[in-house]
Image (tube, grey):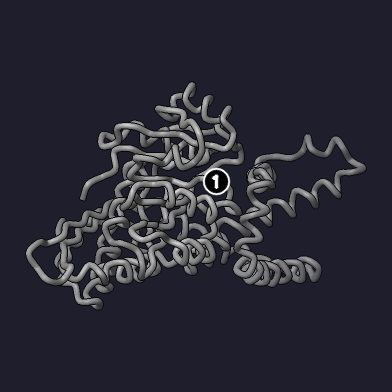
Amino acid sequence: MDMPSRICVVGLGLIGGSLAADLRGVHWVDQVVGYDVDASVVRRAVKLGLVDVCAGGGLADAVAGCGLVIVAVPVGSIATVTREAMAGAPPGALVTDVGSVKAQLVAEVECAMPVGARFVGGHPMAGAEDCGVGAARRGLFKGAAYVLTPTGNTDPEALAVMSKVATSVGAHVMIMGPAAHDEIVAVVSHVPQVAATALMNAALDEMKSRPAGGALAAGGFRDMTRIAGSGPEIWSHILTGNSSEIGRVLEVFEERLGRLRRAIRERDEGAIWREMERARSGRAVMIEVGDTAGSEQVQVVAEGDLRNLGEALTAAGEAGVGLADLDLRRLRGRERPDGRVVLTTLSSKQAALASEHLESRGFRVRLRGQ
């Protein structure tokens, strides 16, 4: 599997700039080209050491000669920019994105792909309330999940390349279908943004006649409203792009909020205790799962028809399998597109899950490292 030595990052905000900065330090990368519709942003990115060169001309000039193009523009523009990048990139180049809404985007891109183009949807689960090229920094993705969303049309070698890209910047890989991704991020990313925004606006309404009240805003309030400082120009596209899943989760959130409201109104301490204890104990379990990812790595070695790989890994990812690495080798001299896949999973339990999904799709599997 040959890794692309020349990379173009399109859109040099927090995510694009941080990816560019991390990839500049990877041994297989010779040059990182920066492109942004605002030429001053690219010049600043060069001065900050985020990219090697400032692309002149248009997008087609920027992606020329690049084996990998990372589209890191706002969600509402990703599909259009991705198609333009595919049209200008060399044959066989891999194009990916970093958008936090996947189902509609992936469908739009795949229905208009040029012959020979390769695309893998991506979403690094990292960020900050600050945005823009000045907020970009190295190490932003260390320990974060990097979701890849292949479909039945995804080239398995392109998926392996993107797995290597993600792990090279310190992230661990989660592979799942685009629709499943949108369902999950609605819960863990999008609705928290909505809740923080609503809470902050409620506080502003309450504090109109008490301007000094902000002096009492301690850690709890600051923690819960931190992401309300995020840019609305970014989030308006995200929230409308995943509106159906966000709406579904908001109904669940409203129902839970209603339970607490009734218990408080009725001064039902037992009901309040049950709601709070369920949240406390559940959060402890959920955070522990995330914090222990990678503490025990087990390799899954599988051989079989690579045309089934994307489907197998998508099913495994939706079952909760995270990867520290994915290595793929085609086995030559065979009529079928067979190959060997080595997955480095984040735990023995996840190795067992990955093995189950690979075996169900005709792969021969063995574990290494237990």
Residue 145 lies, with reference to residue 7, above or below; the image says: below
Q: Residue furthest top?
A: 47
Displayed quadrant of residue 370: bottom left
Displayed quadrant of residue 250: bottom right
Q: Nearer the viewer, residue 97 or 313?
A: 97
Displayed quadrant of residue 134: top right
Q: Is residue 204 left or right of residue 125?
A: right
Q: Horizontal and vertical percent for residue 138? A: 43, 33
Q: Is residue 281 visible?
A: no
> Secondary structure under badge 1?
loop
Q: Residue at x 43, y 54 (%)?
A: 122
Q: Residues within 10 Å of mark 1 (few under 14, many from 20)?
A: many
Q: Is residue 35 visible?
A: yes
Q: Identify residue for label 1.
A: 73
Q: Is residue 285 left or right of residue 261?
A: left
Q: Amino acid at mark 1?
A: Val
Q: Residue at x 63, y 71 (%)?
A: 248
Q: Is residue 146 left or right of residue 216?
A: left
Q: Is residue 162 left or right of residue 224?
A: left
Q: Residue at x 54, y 54 (%)?
A: 80
